[in-house]
Amino acid sequence: MKVVRSIAELPESDGMVGLVPTMGAFHAGHLALFAAAREENDIVVASLFVNPAQFGPAEDLDRYPRDEERDTELAEEAGVDVLFAPSAEEMYPSGYATWVDVGELGQRLEGEFRPDHFRGVATVCLKLFNIVRPTRAYFGQKDAQQAAVVKQLVRDLNLELEIRVVPTVRDEDGLALSSRNAYLSQEEREAALALPRALATKDVDRARAMLAGLDVDYAEEANFNGQRVLAAAVRIGKTRLIDNVVLEGEST
Ligand code: AMP
């Protein structure tokens, strides 16, 4: 596996390229995306970039978990060919001015609580697609609204790549894997289990009742371009967790 830190160093490739955009701190959710990309493409590129543009001023950009050594090992074991870890200075040089706005889809649910989050996501994804030129890009159902935003971006801007969505990987206790789970104390993790349990009811009223003891940003049914999900975001101490279950419609 090649670790590449600048755009100029990225190798040229003839075959089909699968791109997995990530922010690192790899877990089995990321590995499922790598495996899906490995299966369908000649070359697998994983990007590792903690994208400042998708964090709000009061969010966890500075303390977001980073462990590049471990990530390099896990990516290599998963059959990733290129780990692309650009600097923020190269991605957003001084004078950087262009942003992708996906409209209403980026404003509701997560967008209501994280203004500009999806603008940052859409922008970095478009940049990564232009830099890596993948045949396919892989995203997790865990971030259902993000996957919908990326599909919208591809459709609206006539991008020539396929978007694949991989089902959510959960721990044995049902908690969706997330790099942010590392912030949780044992006690907080226990409390966090209410989130997957509530969503598993697939019923918004029952879910809200089960989440009543937590600090809930939202628990709502949503329709993301034809896929209906029950989605929720909760805050547990300083940690914000999101999760969803598909009610109806394809996850790919
Ligand atoms: P992140 O590094 O958190 O930005 O996530 C990178 C990609 O992995 C995104 O497309 C996420 O949706 C996906 N992902 C994160 N957690 C999971 C999970 N538990 N199951 C499946 N995909 C996931």
Image (cartoon, helix red, strand yellow):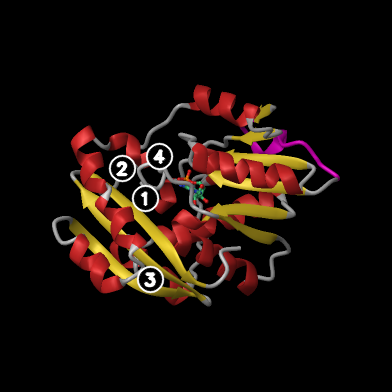
Taking the magenta stretch, the answer to whether it contains residue 11 is yes
Q: Which residue is mark 1?
A: 55
Residue type of the residue flagged with mark 1: Phe
Q: Are marks 1 and 2 in contact (CB under 8 Å)?
A: yes
- State the CA–CA distance, disc 2 to disc 3: 20 Å
Numbered badge on residue 60 = 2
Residue at the (37%, 56%) spot, across then down: 243
Compute the Cα span from label 1 to label 2.
7 Å
Distance CA(mark 4)–CA(mark 3): 24 Å
- Label 4 sits on what residue type? Ser
- The residue wearing badge 4 is 179
Provide residue 183's location: percent of width, then percent of height: 29, 36
Per the image, label 1 sits on a secondary structure element best described as loop
Label 2 amino acid? Asp
Which residue is at 68% across, 46% downward?
Answer: 37
Question: Marks 2 and 4, Cα distance to the nearest angstrom?
Answer: 12 Å
Q: Is residue 35 left or right of residue 23?
A: right
- Choose the circle earlier in sequence order: 1 or 2: 1
Q: Earlier in the sequence, mark 2 or mark 4?
A: 2
Residue on which the image places disc 3: 107
